Amino acid sequence: MPLDFKITTSETNSVPVISVDGEIDIYTSPRLTESIGSAMANHPKAVVLNLENVHYIDSTGLGAIALSAENLSTQGGRLNVVCTKPQLVKIFEVSGLNQKNVNIYDIEAEAVKNT
């Protein structure tokens, strides 16, 4: 597993916030899925996924995010993603996830507020 990958889980105003640092790919996406799954254990209205320190997402990583968003949706929740890097925002737009069950925000405070 790459040494430059890190996941930090915290809580802001009772909203789980998962911050990722590094690349989300075939090697790291299982850890991301596990972290989001753990955050869903208490059935929150939303989970915030902060991708500000992510510089690459492959199809496996995008699939993990999509599956997590779908699982949250079936529980009546949503996935709020913090992402400002144009190349990553484009991935969400091209995949259509931003029009289904993933909300994109520029600022973590806004993502938490809109839960």
Image: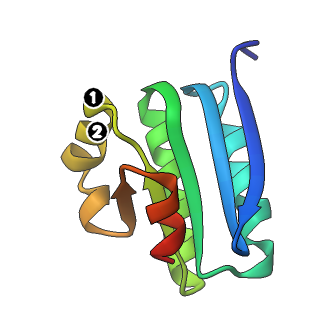
The three-letter code of the residue at mark 1 reads: Gln
The three-letter code of the residue at mark 2 reads: Ile
Residue at image point 55% right, 27% down:
25
Residue 95 coordinates in the image, percent (x, y) = 26, 48
Per the rendering, the mark at residue 103 is: none
Residue 28 coordinates in the image, percent (x, y) = 66, 29
Residue 77 coordinates in the image, percent (x, y) = 54, 80
Q: Which residue is mark 2?
A: 91
Q: CA distance from mark 1 to mark 2?
A: 7 Å
As displayed, is residue 95 above or below residue 5?
A: below
Identity of the residue furthest to the top in this view: 3
The 10 Å Cα crowd at callout 2, few under 14, some 14 to 19, many 20 or more, is: some
- Which SS class for mark 2? helix
The 10 Å Cα crowd at callout 1, few under 14, some 14 to 19, many 20 or more, is: few
Q: Which residue is mark 1?
A: 87
Residue at image point 80% right, 61% down:
38
- Which SS class for mark 1? helix
Residue 54 coordinates in the image, percent (x, y) = 51, 28
